Image (cartoon, grey):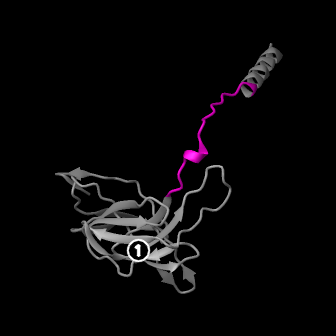
């Protein structure tokens, strides 16, 4: 009886392995247009860099080409702030010459000959007010639990950049790993 069950299991496994489902998705590669690809990070604490390249075919094993003749413009709340400068044509790296230091809606507009222009928009929220940091538990010299509280506008979808610094103690480099349990408490329309 045990041998019969074993044979049935092997038989079923072989049937499933040989009868795999497959779906073929047809596409016309010639209809897919090459587009600009932009990777950037905007912060009010650091220089703004942007990397510009173009897409390649899904069938290609090549490296996407970089674009070193693009025009990049930065806008804040629909007001023109200035142009990016090309700083490394080998990797398509551009830099905005100033550090933006205010909250608001920022937009990067990118254009290059032979491509449709692309734009990206993001918000830098106002600096957090009423910030409090509390060490909740001091497990040992390497692990601590910290609670951060601040007021947040519940009507706005904001994302925050948290900068955690490490200390250097003589010959020992102390690294900081940050993790969050994402404990969010809403009280009277403000986040905590």
Task: State whether residue 172 appears in this view.
Answer: yes
Query: Closest to the observer: 20 or 143?
Result: 20
Query: Which residue sits furthest top?
Result: 1
Q: Which residue is mark 1?
A: 48
Corner quadrant of residue 139: bottom left
- Depicted 66 relative to depicted 12: above or below: below
Residue 185 screen position, x and y as percent: 27, 52
* Residue 128 position in % (x across, y down): 25, 68
Q: Which residues are magenta?
A: 18-35
Q: Is residue 87 left or right of residue 75?
A: right
Residue 109, image x, y percentages: 37, 65
**Which residue sits furthest left?**
188
Task: Please give the name of the residue rendered at 77% of the width and 17% of the height, measured from the top-left corner.
Answer: 8
Structural crowding at the residue carrying mark 1, measured as other residues with C-alpha within 10 Å and reported as few (<14), some (14–19) or many (≥20):
some
**192 drawn magenta:** no
User: Is 10 situated left or right of 50 in this image?
Assistant: right
At 59% across and 75% down in the image, what residue appears? 90
- Residue at (41% x, 61% y) in the render: 117
Which one is in front, 136 or 60? Answer: 60
Whether the magenta-drawn stretch holds residue 31 is answered as yes
Residue sitting at the far right = 3
Quarter of the rendering occupied by the C terminus: bottom left
């Amino acid at each position: 009886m045990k041998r019969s069950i074993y044979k049935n299991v092997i038989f079923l496994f072989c049937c499933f392995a040989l009868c795999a489902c497959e779906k073929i998705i047809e596409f016309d590669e010639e209809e897919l247009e090459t587009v600009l690809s932009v990777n950037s990070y905007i912060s009010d604490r650091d220089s703004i860099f942007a990397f510009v390249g173009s897409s390649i075919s899904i069938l290609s094993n090549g490296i996407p080409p970089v674009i070193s003749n693009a025009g990049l413009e930065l806008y804040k709340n629909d007001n023109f702030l200035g142009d990016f400068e090309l700083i490394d044509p080998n990797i398509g790296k551009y830099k905005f010459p100033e550090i933006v230091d205010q909250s608001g809606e920022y937009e990067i507009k990118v254009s290059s000959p032979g491509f449709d222009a692309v734009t990206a928009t993001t918000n830098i929220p106002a600096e957090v007010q009423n910030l409090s940091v509390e060490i909740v538990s001091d497990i040992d010299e390497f692990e601590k639990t910290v609670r951060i509280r601040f007021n947040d506008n519940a009507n706005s979808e904001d994302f925050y950049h948290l900068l955690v610094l490490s200390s250097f103690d003589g010959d020992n480099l102390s690294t900081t790993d940050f993790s969050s349990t994402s404990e969010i408490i809403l009280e009277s329309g403000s986040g905590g």
